Amino acid sequence: MPPHSFLLAVAAAFLAVAIITGDEVSVSGLSLDIHHRYSPVVQRWAEARGHAGISWPAAAGDGQLVLRSPEYYSTLSLHDHALFSRRGLAQSDPLTFADGNATFQLVGSLHYAAVSVGTPNTTFLVALDTGSDLFWVPCDCKQCANVTAAMAAGDNSQLFRQYSPSKSSTSKKVTCENPLCVTPNACSNSTTSCPYAVNYVSANTSSSGDLVEDVIYLTGAGGDTGVKAAPVVFGCGQIQTGLFLEGAAADGLLGLGIEKVSVPSILAANGVVKSDSFSMCFSSDGVGRINFGDTGAANQAQTPYIVRPTHPFYNISVTSMSVGGKELPVGFYAVVDSGTSFTYLSGPAYTALTTNFNAQVREKRINITSARSRSGSLPFDYCYELKSDQTDLLVPEVNLTTKGGAVFPVTDPIVVVVGRLPNGQARALGYCLAVIKSDLPIDIIGQNFMTGLKVVFNREKSVLGWQEFDCYKDVKMSDAGGVGSPSPSPGPTTHINPQPQVNDGNGQIPGAAPLPRPNSAAGHAVSGGVVFFSMMMLAAAIF
């Protein structure tokens, strides 16, 4: 009998950009678009507002090449390591590139959300955190990262924004008698404002101030796509310390934990959405969506989870894995965390997955170097060469079997690595199994294993659900103002064309341009435990 294993599934952190209006809420679900930390939208937003803590692995203008270069993947793995350090899972390690141009301290999150609050609204680029609950923004600041940066730069402009309850007509005081006030002992009486203080795992990192109630703006889910104003309780963050002053959450933080003070729980408790449940999906181009109130489809696969009171994650049991149709009776404890870029396994789980994957691929195993990474190479142990004239790619299918027998399909287990030739052209150098050998005390299933799925976190029924899903199916979403970026798993084959990606000469970033949606004959197909890929349209496969 294979050992039972437990998987801690963590709701993800995202970047969402919403158009703001003042509509009233009367919908069954509310949603936000998802954008990756290194997407063109996030880069333009951050650079225009001078936000600290948001860095890019290479200069803007390299377009798609940047987003699939060895440096890009190395940078994401360094971000993961910094995240583990902040959570107390690994030793802190300064991140310095070999070229000496910059010391790269990745103190920010993998995903962010452009969230607007108040009337009139003020918009913040908030970090989203899977390990905490409270939503807070810089507010009537006494010590905040954006104020500190503005003073250092001698800049008093509106680039460094604060929320002020006194300037919002929809703001309400949260008193100490409110059920969401967890510090009543710090109150002088029941009618005073409820203070909050949140201490994070990172040393001396905290946020404190008072709780307030105001509206945030979200998009209606399903057929109702108008922007809605939803009342929530959040922190008026007057004092930040530690990594927050270095830019870890320069514009605030939105927690997606399981406590009553989290935004998903507040929306359900206020009757704004019908269920204390939410779903999220990721597509391979870095775009996706989170839907608050979504309980998923009736025919979705699902498994029960157990919430540990001392740990704000979602525990599920995984009983086995399969690679290329071969069953592997291996169990492991892990965290499924979409705030982590890649999947980190140790011991028997790592060995079983990687050795069986390696035995079934037909490409030559190689080491793809990255001049800017700490080690000089990618963080992946199992990478394979793609020849310039190669037209087909066969990848073993990877699945996880959960308690109750439901199969969690890993639709995107590999990453394609792109590099420049001596003549300046770009082509696919190879691909890697995006699993990293871990020495952490826990294993982690990262965002890459969730790509191509809609994952439902039903907190009312203690069920985790999922189904293969096109994030563009029901709503318009784009990373750069255009609709039509490819879904991660649209059909029989994904086409890759190893052609150069260059700046178009007018200042536009190729990676920001809308990409054509694949037709019904594009994508990947599974047959006999393997996934077939076809090598045409590099842009569709590598951004």
Image (cartoon, grey):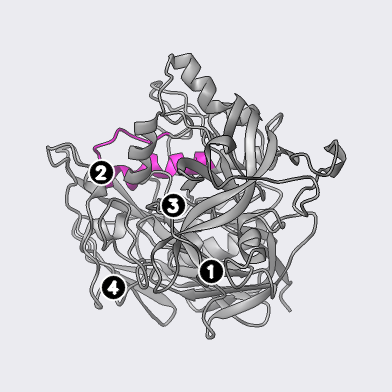
From this viewpoint, which residue is outermost toward the left? 505
The magenta region covers 55-79
Count of marks placed on residues: 4
**Residue at (49%, 52%) from the top-left corner?**
14
Q: Residues within 10 Å of mark 3 (few under 14, many from 20)?
A: many
Label 1 Cα crowd, 10 Å radius (few <14 / some 14-19 / many 20+): many
Q: Residue at x 64, y 68 (%)?
A: 276
Residue 483 shown in magenta: no
Residue assigned mark 2: 63
Mark 4 → mark 3, Cα distance in angstroms: 30 Å
Check disc 3 and give the amino acid type.
Ala
Mark 4 is on which residue type? Thr
Q: First in sequence: mark 4 or mark 2?
A: 2
Left or right: 381 in relation to 491: right
Q: Is residue 225 above or below residue 62?
A: below
How packed mark 2 is, by other alpha carbons closer than 10 Å (few <14, some 14-19, many 20 or more), is many
Q: Which mark is residue 16?
A: 3
Mark 1, mark 2: which one is toward the viewer? 1
Q: Which mark is residue 493?
A: 4
Q: Amino acid at mark 2?
A: Gly
**Cα–Cα gap, marks 4 and 1:** 24 Å
- Eyeballing the image, is 124 above or below 327? above
* Residue type marked 1: Val
